Structure formats: C-alpha cells, structure tokens
Amino acid sequence: MHRRALLAALPLFALLPATAALAHPNQAPTGAEAQRMIDEVTAFRAKLAKAVETKDFATLRASYADSFSHTQCTSPRPKAGSSP
C-alpha cells in the first residue's frame, strides 16, 4: 500500500523547485557579508586572547558554550592492555 502511494506521488515531486531540497545555498559568503564574519571572528579571538592574558575568568567563562569540554591531548597515553 505504501509503495503504491509513493509511486503515485512521484510525479508531484517534479513540480517542486530544485532548490527546495537544499537547506543552505552552495556558495561562500562574499563582499560585506564575508568581511563581517571575518571581523566578528577576529574580534572574538582578540577578546579571548586578552582575557587569557589578564586572567579574566568571567570573560573566559562567558566565551565558552555550556557544553564545552576540554580534552588534554599532550598527556602520555596509556599503553595497550594497561588499566587507566
């Protein structure tokens, strides 16, 4: 039954515009939009660097998402077969 309904609806899909299935345009931002994004990221990085330098913990806490999790990647790895 479901297969027949799907087959009957197939011609209707041809009536939809091709872009209706795309969530986002397939192009990079340009011009003023691109510069705005660059400026926003640059300002955030400068703010973060200043907060680290001055040890401003309130700004640092506000800069990270609540779900942020830091993983230490420089610690020695346990050998295979050993317990943590």
Image (spheres, helix red, strand yellow):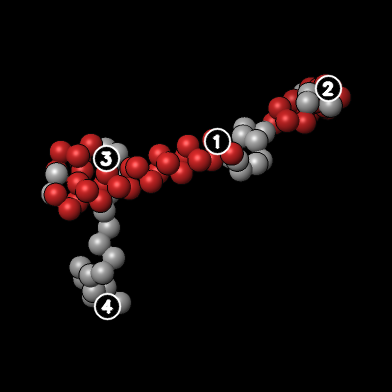
Q: Which residue is mark 2?
A: 15
How far is disc 3 from disc 4 in space, using C-alphas?
A: 36 Å
The N terminus appears in which quarter of the rendering?
Answer: top right
Q: Mark 3 and mark 1: span between their CA atoms? A: 25 Å
Is residue 67 something that shows in the picture?
no
In this rendering, the answer to whether 18 lies above or below 54 is: above
Residue at image x 47%, y 39%?
37
Looking at the rendered structure, the kind of residue marked 2 is Leu
Residue 69 location (% of width, % of height): 27, 49
The mark that comes first in sequence, 2 or 4, is 2
Q: 16 left or right of 80?
A: right
Identify which amino acid the numbered label 3 is placed on.
Ser
Total residue callouts: 4
**Label 2 close to label 4 by CB (< 8 Å):** no
The amino acid on which the numbered mark 4 sits, given as a three-letter code, is Lys
Q: Residue at 60% across / 40% down in the picture?
A: 30
Q: Which residue is mark 3?
A: 63
Q: CA distance from mark 4 to mark 1?
A: 52 Å
Look at the picture and state if 25 lies above or below 20.
below
> Which residue position is annotated with label 4?
79
Type of amino acid under label 1 = Ala
Question: Which residue lies under the disc numbered 1?
Answer: 32
Give the percent coordinates (x, y) of residue 40: 40, 39
User: Which label's residue is closer to the chain start, 3 or 2?
Assistant: 2
Q: Is residue 47 above or below residue 22?
A: below
Marks 3, 1: nearer the viewer: 1
The Cα–Cα distance between marks 2 and 4, rounded to whole angstroms, is 60 Å
